[in-house]
Image (cartoon, rainbow, N blue to C red):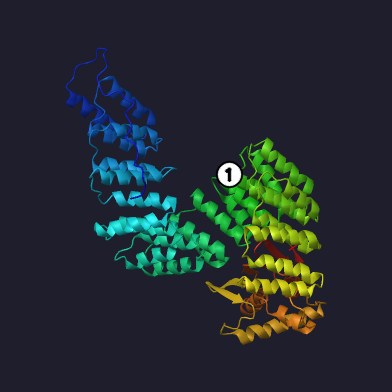
Amino acid sequence: MFSKHPLPRTSCFYSTTPPTSSSPHKPESLLVKKCIFLLQNCGSSKLKLRQIHAFSIRHGVPLNDPDIGKHLIYNLVSLSAPMSYPHNIFSCIRSSNVFTWNTMIRGYAESESPEPALQLYRQMRASCIQPDTHTYPFLLKAVAKLADVRIGEIVHSTVIRNGYDSLAFVQNSLLHMYAACGLVDSAHKAFELMSERDIVAWNSVINGFALNGKPNEALTLFREMGLEGVKPDGYTVLSLLSACAELGALALGRRVHVYMVKVGLTDNLHVNNALLDFYAKCGSIREARKVFDEMKERNAVSWSSLIVGLAVNGFGEEALELFKEMETEELVPSEVTFVGVLYACSHCGMVHEGFSYFKRMKEKYGIVPKIEHHGCIVDLLSRAGLVKEAYQYIRNMPMQPNAVIWRTLLGACTMHGHLTLGEYARAQVLKLEPGYSGDYVLLSNLYASEQRWSDVHVLRRKMLREGVKKIPGYSLVEFGNHVYEFLMGDRSHPQSDQIYAMLAEITKRLRLEGYAPHTENVLADIEEEEKENALSYHSEKIAVAFMLLKTAPGIPIRIVKNLRICADCHLAIKLTSKVFEREIIVRDQSRFHHFRDGFCSCKDYW
């Protein structure tokens, strides 16, 4: 059903006959009972388990006995021993019962190599062993790890045929499997059909939504959970913080934080790491630092999360200082830590230091650079204006560059005016990811900056001919425990008249400060006035107007944008932060921008 080749029943490497040396003569049944008693009371010690196993061999206990075998296998699996050990015992047993088969399937499902669990299930059916209520949850766990929805659907149909689909723990396993396979809508549908839903079911679907790019749905389900009187636990909190981070929903995440304190989850290392990461991704780096400072226990993930958070929020110097503290504490940095360190060097323009850290990562810590680290070096050179050097670095990389690296170079060419190299970078991206509209926009920007409007029109016709659709830009803001989404020229909001009146007022006050629309990169050969109108209604400007209208003076404004912020919006929001005396934090596709008093943390590189 799942594999053409069943698992081999290999010969046992353990003796099943009494040793020739003299040993106490006891009835076999008493020896078996004694071994079973020892196995049932050995606790969580692998050493004791091995000693009991050795005792069994030494005293001639037949290890092909199903009772001895099942207890040995159960204990080994429970202690997460390497699966080769219980598998060899399993291969010796005369006639394994369903409990032993289930234990083996569970062991492989919980291991790093879950494929044999499916093979065992096939072999189990071929041996005429009828699966029971415990078989399918273990099997579905293996399928979830493999993220193989085709097999998952086959197992689901088998579950229904065998009449196990009404059991809560089987239903929960199905939810988890569909969510892990990315079919979160199928998981939600199965969830809605359940007559009784426990905390595991709620968590499975909430986490599925959060991990599959549907944070709004995750938060909606959390609210429903509260209305039904189901109390969240640590797993719920982890999923919620992930969803809040994705949306930039700071207020709701703070409520989750309050709940953590209320129920005593602030001592949970994993939850604290998620909380730290949430604040960093919402641009509230001071709160992230406060969480870090108050943690009773920290691990390398804690340090790495804050280092990365500081780096992407524009606090490169602080990120590097924290890395030095981490080394002083003699904690071993990970691959992720060095992504943050290299990004910090990039943000600070520390080219020489960036290469030094890159060398230390390899030589001192033995970390083999991955594509992300090489991407950071390309970004480091690009941000410093060393575009040709970045290109040479890409050519000499020990691995094939991906689309992200070529796209970084393309963005640098657009920023620094390297047309020929930009066209080459775009050609490389086209080979790897031909349908991404953002690359067309970057190249169009490059052509527009050179006043090459005929090339802009050719590129646009090519997009239409190849069916490439421009990804609509949107901006998310949180107000009153609700996340609002705005599109370019959006008038769907009930208060759109007031919003656009505020937008006009902002533009008027900015012009008094010397603001002139940055029309150079409007991708059309049209009149200047039309270009200015096109720029006026970008989604982030509408979002800023809405928040200025709805929030009290002095309250920071936070915006999450799916695309890169354009030059004109960057300039306008920078001046808005000064004129209206507001801190405005924008998280765009590439980085954070902390606007305050007319300055931006990115130092005007966007």
Residue lying furthest top: 22
Label 1, residues with CA under 10 Å away: few <14, some 14-19, many ≥20:
some
On screen, 600 above or below 527? above
- Residue 495: name its quadrant: bottom right
Q: Secondary structure at mark 1?
A: helix
On screen, 383 above or below 331? below
Q: Position of residue 526 (x, y in %)?
A: 77, 82
Residue lying furthest bottom: 497
Q: Position of residue 593 (x, y in %)?
A: 70, 64
Report if residue 543 is visible in the image. yes
Q: Please tell me which residue lies in front, 181 or 465.
A: 465
Report if residue 319 is visible in the image. no
User: Which residue does the image show at 67% across and 62% down from the upper left?
Assistant: 592
Q: Position of residue 505 (x, y in %)?
A: 72, 83
Q: How many marks?
A: 1
User: Which residue does the image show at 55% across and 49% down from the upper left?
Assistant: 295
Side of 320 where 333 appears, left or right = left
User: Which residue does the image show at 63% across and 73% down from the upper left?
Assistant: 465
Q: Amino acid at mark 1?
A: Ala
Side of 518 where 306 appears, left or right = left
- Residue 480: name its quadrant: bottom right
Q: Position of residue 581 (x, y in %)?
A: 73, 72
On screen, 342 above or below 421? above
- Residue 597: name its quadrant: bottom right
Q: Please tell me which residue lies in front, 558 or 414.
A: 414
In what quadrant of the picture does the C terminus appear? bottom right
Q: Please tell me which residue lies in front, 280 or 18.
A: 18
Residue under pointer 1: 300
